[in-house]
Structures are given as C-alpha cells and as structure tokens.
Image (spheres, rainbow, N blue to C red):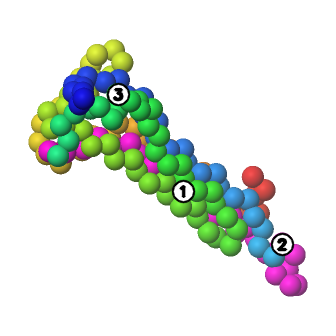
Amino acid sequence: MVMFVDQVQVHVQAGRGGNGCVSIRREKFKPLAGPDGGNGGNGGDVVLVADPQVTTLLDYHRRPHRTAENGGYGAGDYRNGAHGMELVLPVPVGTVVKDAEGETLADLTEPGTRFIAAKGGLGGLGNNALASAKRKAPGF
C-alpha cells in the first residue's frame, strides 16, 4: 500500500569544516625550513531542490535525520583538505519550508528552485596560512 505524506519534520545538519594542519618542511641541511601545513576543506551544504518528478515526502518521513559530508583535513606539503559534498534533497514542487517556530523560510514553487537549508562550516587554517614576517614558523 502506497502512503502519501504531505507534511514532515526533517532534521538537517551541514558538514563541518576540516582541521588545518601543523607541519614543518624538512630538508637535508635545513632542519626547520618553514611551515608547510595545508588548510582544511569546507563542509558540505544541505540544499532543498524542487523536483517535478517527486510527488511525496515519504522518504523524509521514514528517515528524518540527514547530514552533509564533512570537509577533509589539511596535510603537510601545502596540501589542502577536500571540500565536503553538498547533500541535495529533492522535494515536490510547491513545498513550503518552515522553521521550528512556524515561520516561512522558503516557498519552492518553480521546478529547480534551490534553498540552502544549512550552510557548511569553513575549514580551519594550516600553519602556512598563519605565517607572517614576525612569526615565521607558527606551531599552532
């Protein structure tokens, strides 16, 4: 038996940003050649998209908790972390998005309309990005 669900409560969480890296470049005759830690990647967003192929919210009734991908960690040798993939949630055309208090946030009336429900976190800085003329090798 097919159920029709037209009202659901969905709990979304955006991806967290990855940590930056603390790393010191090492060469043969230079034991402390300077910082080379990369930045962390940004977390993924949670995006609601109005899709004409979707007719019910039954998937979100059965699985109400959705989480986007976290950003990757930075690494040595100036390597930045990977950005988290955004989580795209298709909803029927005409969906009205409300917050916990009942205030309307978005009305997805046109096919392809996008609404960012949760913005992903920013990645942390590596010690290479924190270096300056006075602080040549930050250790944090």
Q: Position of residue 79 (x, y in %)?
A: 62, 69
The quadrant of the rendering that contains the N terminus is top left
Q: Position of residue 84 (x, y in %)?
A: 49, 54
Q: Earlier in the sequence, mark 1 or mark 2?
A: 2
Q: Position of residue 76 (x, y in %)?
A: 70, 68
* Residue in view at x 85 percent, y 80 percent: 30
Please state if 116 lies on the left or on the right of 104 as rendered.
right
Q: Secondary structure at mark 1?
A: loop
Give whichever of 82, 35 is nearer the camera.
82
Decide: few, some or many residues near mark 3? Use Cα within 10 Å; few <14, some 14-19, many ≥20.
some
Please state if 40 lies on the left or on the right of 30 as rendered.
left
Disc 1 residue type (three-letter): Gly
* Residue in view at x 14 percent, y 33 percent: 94
Q: Secondary structure at mark 3?
A: helix
The verdict on residue 108 being magenta is: no
* Residue in view at x 49 percent, y 57 percent: 83
Q: Nearer the viewer, mark 1 or mark 2?
A: 1
Q: Which residues are magenta?
A: 27-52
Please state if 103 lies on the left or on the right of 64 as rendered.
left
Q: Which residue is mark 2?
A: 32
Q: Which residue is mark 1?
A: 41
Placement of 116 over or under 36, stated as above or below: above
Disc 3 residue type (three-letter): His
The verdict on residue 50 being magenta is: yes
Decide: few, some or many residues near mark 1? Use Cα within 10 Å; few <14, some 14-19, many ≥20.
many
Q: Which residue is mark 3?
A: 61
* Residue in view at x 68 percent, y 73 percent: 77
Disc 2 residue type (three-letter): Leu
Q: Position of residue 43 (x, y in %)?
A: 49, 49
Give whichever of 2, 44 is nearer the camera.
2
